[in-house]
Amino acid sequence: MSAVTGIAAAGNGQEMYAGRILAYDGLGQRLAKGVPAKDWRKVLDAANLNFRFHKDDVQDMAGNVIEGQQVVYREVVGGPNDGQRKHVGIVKMRHSLDGSQPEQMMEAAALANPGGTFETAGMLEKNCRLWVQMSGGDELVIDPKGANDRVGNYFTVTTMPNGDGATLFGDAFVRFNCTNVITSAIRGSDWLFRIRHTQSHADRVTAAVKAIAAARTHREIAAATFTELFETAFSTKQFENVVTTLHGARPEDNVKGRLTKWETMRDQHMWAWNAAHNAAIRETAWGAWQSVLEVSQWMRTMQDTPHGRENFYAAGAGFDGPTNDLRRKSLVLVGARAGVKV
């Protein structure tokens, strides 16, 4: 199976591994060569993220206006799709439509991280959130003369294009050897920072600068933790115990295929633990955690939700609460068994 499905049969993981792309690239549009922070306006045009919003009255079947509600349309400004409209939804009258929200988000990100580059951008259709991915500085190299395990640093920024909702700054890592995205609080330092939409533009920029500073502190704590996990031995038996704790003991019967599913899950974890691209970190606590993350991100089956089918790449990129919760939960389990504070 390809990585797009998120399903890999036991023993077929190498085929899936070969087809992976960075989750952000699968979710949005990669910006050629990256866009320097100072040129943030180009990102809005290149990724068609420059929108204007319109409201119209909502009418019932008889043509009567329904008080207190309006329908919202999103119109593209500039570029090849200039003027194109798309229905967004019905909002309460109290919701403001601040068309400058995307511009404010981009400017705040650029001022907070002037040395970064915008690399990918897009829109989460489920809740109409705009998002961008920025480089966050030099990559972390764990054991440079040995395992040479490279971990990239990134910021993600998301906002509601109509001004109704907070802007979120996230501190994310990508382990390049398996393209795992890492989003997790570590040692009491959070990875996600919220900027209230009710603040003035000047206050939003100030808050963005503080968020980036906090994210850099989180990054330093994370780097030290990742290195300590790598330096801590972790046996296959300990890894199997983590998997059992996360997913439960082996079922005694195959009612509704639960034994088959459990065995497939276990085989996927053991494949990741023993995979060639993880050989340099095997038998370490870092390798145990990355193996769990690899299965949760790349070998998962997409679920149907009240909002429609789960987006494979959105979950991988850090825009899915349950996936982020599992990243933290598995880190806590590995840390507890390894004796490492996480």
Image: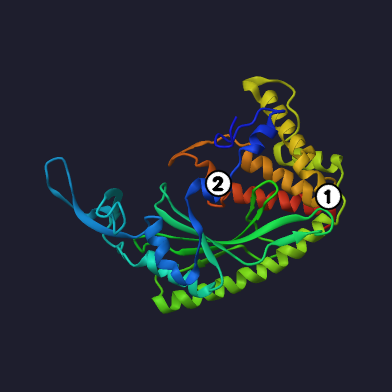
Query: Front-most of 240 and 286?
Result: 286
Query: Is residue 14 at least partly visible in the picture?
Result: yes
Where residue 47 appears, as percent x and y from the top left, is 41, 55
**Image position of 244 (left or right of 184):** right
* Tag shown at residue 88: none
Where residue 224 appears, as percent x and y from the top left, is 77, 65
Image height check: is 7 above or below 201?
Answer: above
Kindly indicate the quadrant of the structure image that contains residue 340. bottom right
* Disc 1 residue crowd, few under 14, some 14–19, many 20+, Cα 10 Å: many
Residue behind mark 2: 315
Q: Extreme front residue here?
A: 33
- Quarter of the image containing the C terminus? bottom right
**Image position of 25 (left or right of 12):** left
Q: Which amino acid does label 2 sit on?
A: Ala
Query: Is residue 342 at least partly visible in the picture?
Result: no
- Quarter of the image containing the N terminus? top right
Give the secondary structure at mark 2.
helix
Where residue 76 appears, as percent x and y from the top left, is 30, 55
* Tag shown at residue 284: 1
Residue drawn at point x = 66 percent, y = 50 percent: 327
Image height check: is 298 above or below 50?
Answer: above
Query: Front-most of 15 and 131?
Result: 15
Residue drawn at point x = 82 percent, y = 48 percent: 280
